Amino acid sequence: MERQGEEMCFACGPKNPIGLKLEFELNDDIIESKFTPEEVHQGFDGIMHGGLVSTLLDEIMANMLYLQGVKAVTAKMETKFRKPVEIGQELTITGWIEREKKRTINTAAKIINQEGQKVAEAEAVFMRIDGK
Ligand SMILES: CCCCCCCCCC(=O)SCCNC(=O)CCNC(=O)[C@H](O)C(C)(C)COP(=O)(O)OP(=O)(O)OC[C@H]1O[C@@H](n2cnc3c(N)ncnc32)[C@H](O)[C@@H]1OP(=O)(O)O
């Protein structure tokens, strides 16, 4: 099978037919994306699946580093699910860097719903895989 690399990323790949197709806006050190969950993204009726909520948070932090040319993978991540994420409501996902060490980068992210409520947040440790 022909490999299509980044274009097949489940969260951001434009060619992944079942992907979330996220797009990003990076301004200085803050990254933002918008996503509206549909019925296919639900777990309990009318509520977005928590694993996919975590995916949004993981991806925003990963892409913030990727778009700045940092090669790193998620090594550890903690998600707090603050409120049920309703299907059909546009979400604003934001990510930023908390601190950096030689090998690790601590990041954070949050998701705000249409009513301005924080529905989920995460903290993560990314580890550089570029040998720096
Ligand atoms: C288009 C593309 C756009 C971007 C797409 C992004 C996709 C979304 C982002 C992801 O989800 S990435 C996929 C999920 N993550 C992974 O698959 C990572 C899997 N894990 C690894 O590859 C390795 O475990 C890792 C590179 C993280 C570390 O392996 P190493 O062999 O370099 O670590 P090593 O065992 O030598 O440990 C070095 C230090 O790091 C620490 N460490 C290792 N793994 C850790 C871990 N997981 N969490 C915290 N600390 C960790 C370890 O304790 C040790 O600390 P000390 O030096 O103090 O002893």
Image (tube, grey):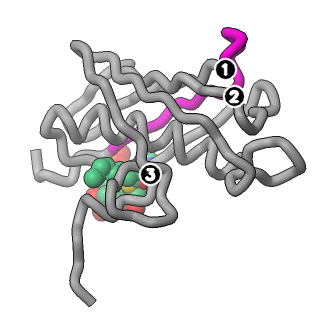
Q: Residue 69's mark?
A: none
Residue type at tag 1: Asn
Dot 1 lies on which element?
loop
Q: Which residue is at 25% across, 15% downward? A: 27
Distance Cα–Cα, label 2 vs label 3 = 18 Å
Residue corresponding to mark 2: 89
The rendered magenta stretch, by its main secondary structure, is classed as: strand
Percent position of residue 77, x then y: 53, 42
Q: Between tags 2 and 3, which lies in front? A: 2
Question: Does dot 3 land on a helix, a strand or a loop?
Answer: loop
Quadrant of the rendered structure where residue 33 is? Answer: top left
Residue labelled with disc 1: 113
**Residue, disc 3:** 11
The residue at 45%/66% (across/down) is 17
Near-viewer residue (76 or 95): 95
Whether pointer 2 and pointer 3 mark residues with C-beta atoms closer than 8 Å, the reply is no
Residue displayed at 40% across by 23% down: 32
| Residue 23 visible in the displayed image | yes
Left or right of 49? Residue 76 is left
Residue 50 falls left or right of residue 12: right
